[in-house]
Structure formats: structure tokens, C-alpha cells
Image: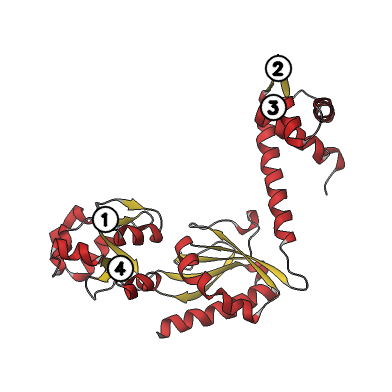
Amino acid sequence: MLRKAFLPPIADLLAFEAAARHTSISRAAEELHLTQSAVSRQIRQLEAQLGMAVFHRVRQRVVLTDAGRVYAADVRAVLQQLAAATQKTMAWSDGGGLLNLAVLPTFGTRWLIPRLADFAALHPDVTVNIAARSEPFDFAQEPLDAAIHFGAPLWAGAVCEYLMHEQVVPLCSPAYRQRLGIAQVQGVARAVLLQQTTRPTQWADWFEQVGTDGQHGQNALRGPRYEQFAMIAQAAVSGLGAALLPRFLVEAEIASGALVQLFPQALQSSDAYYLVYPESRAEAPLVRAFRDWIRGAAGQEKDR
């Protein structure tokens, strides 16, 4: 239960947070469109409820006490969460529902979002919010209904629904290939190898798979690193090097000729894409609807 004694008026918290951020009562008053006396009164009320001072008054400035500094960080986080929750609720479609998803950034931008119109056509009253997440997280600590995960089907307290594997292929710009004269697999050794931060051994794995790992050694681990596939794709298009990319994420660049596949050998991995959702949400109608739709969409991808 929430005890009222531990819940200060939000106006007092807003005044405190603004004064803490500006280290100034007057600037906080300007931001909140209040008088300085009103802001000072709200802070005094908060200090009375806390039973301690949150500021030292130093001439025309206010300086947080040690306790005030800790409290200000917590209050700011809570106010941000409250604002986000309110915004999400305001986005709720009348008579529909709200589905909050966490997706891998490039997967979301290049695969999921271009297909969401199909889901919207089936469920026109559902609002889908998308957040970017690259690593597993605790659903109990995040206001999210489901996530797209790449890796092994392991996620504490969650169900992992298989979607698809990926074909990771070597690519570069046509000009880069011509400049380096890459005609055989061994020629890739002359290229700058663009590395994916979360898959640091990917090039080494590819060379091993095609049977040339002994000729490359540590070179397979060298090269500039990028956090997202979208960054690597753009770097490859810009002629910065050769990249290993999931083919389905760069189909547009391949179709346009901005990227060319160097060799047919694709990196095979036991990892795959999964739809993940907490066990407690397994029977939620919106989660089930999205699960059925995305599994169908992923199945179409596999059949291509």
C-alpha cells in the first residue's frame, strides 16, 4: 500500500527538482511560471515533511545537501517515469489497446517497422510503442510487454518464441571491391573489416567456416567497431570497408547496387531471432495477437 505520509504533493516535488537542477529559486520559478515566494514555500513544505533540509542557502543560490542530492536524483527519475506513463496512456486508442515492445534497433528499423502496417490493418485500434533495446532486461523493471531478442532462447522468467535464423554474408560497395580487386576469399584479407561490437568474433567465425582462418589469424579481429548493423551498413556503402551483415536487413542496398555480396558463403549460427514475453503475459490478448502475426511474418521471410 502507498502511504500518504511518504507521498509529497507533486507540486512540491516539481519545485524541488527544478530548483535542484538550476541551483536557483528564481530560475525554478521562471520555469514553473510561479513566484519565487511560491517555490520557496513549496520547498519548505517538502523539507517539513522530510524532517530535514534539502538545500543550503548560499547568497543568491541554493546548494543541495548530501541527502538532497540523493533525493533529487530519485525524484527526477520518478517524475520522468510518471511523465512517460502519462504520455503512453494518452496515446491509448479508444476501444483498442496499447502494446509496448522492445526491439533491436536495426531489426526494428529495417524489418519490423516496414511490416507493421500489416499488423495495424488487422488490429486498427491497437497502439504499438517501440523502444530500442540491445540486451536482455528484467520485464519486472520495465513497462514493456514483449521484446525481440537475438541469441539463444534463454531469458529469465520469459517465454522465447522462435522467429527465424539469419544469413550473414560478406558485403562491400562495388567501388571498394573494384579498388581492392577482391576476386577470391583470400582477397578479403586486404580489406578493412568492419566489426560489430556485440559480435566481436564474427569475421573470425566466417573465415573459419570457409576454411581460411589460418591465413588471417588476428587480422579477423581488427577493424573499426560499430554498435549497430545500420551503422555498419552505412559504413560499407560509404566505402569504409567490408562488412558481415544479415542479408535480410540490407536487401534495399543490395537491390539498388549500393552493396554487393562478395561471396556466396554465409555465416551459419545457432543463434536466432526470438519474440520474448514474460510468462505472466503469455495469455494477454494483445501479446497473443502480436505473437501470431509476427510468427507469420517471420515464416514468410524464411520462405523467400
Which of these two is toward me, 129 or 140? Answer: 129
Secondary structure beneath label 4: loop
Q: Position of residue 230 (x, y in %)?
A: 40, 61
- Per the image, the residue denoted by label 2 is 60
Q: Secondary structure at mark 1?
A: loop
Residue at point 82%, 47% (across, down) = 2
Q: Answer with the quarter of the image where residue 25 lies.
A: top right
Residue 240 - label: 1
Q: Amino acid at mark 3?
A: Ala
Separation of disc 4 and disc 2 at Cα? 60 Å
Say which element carries label 3.
Answer: helix
- In the rendered structure, which disc, 2 or 3, sits on the residue that comes first in sequence? 2
Q: Residue 52, percent across and down?
A: 78, 24
The residue closer to the viewer here, 293 or 234, is 234
Check disc 3 and report the residue beneath it. 67
Label at residue 99: none
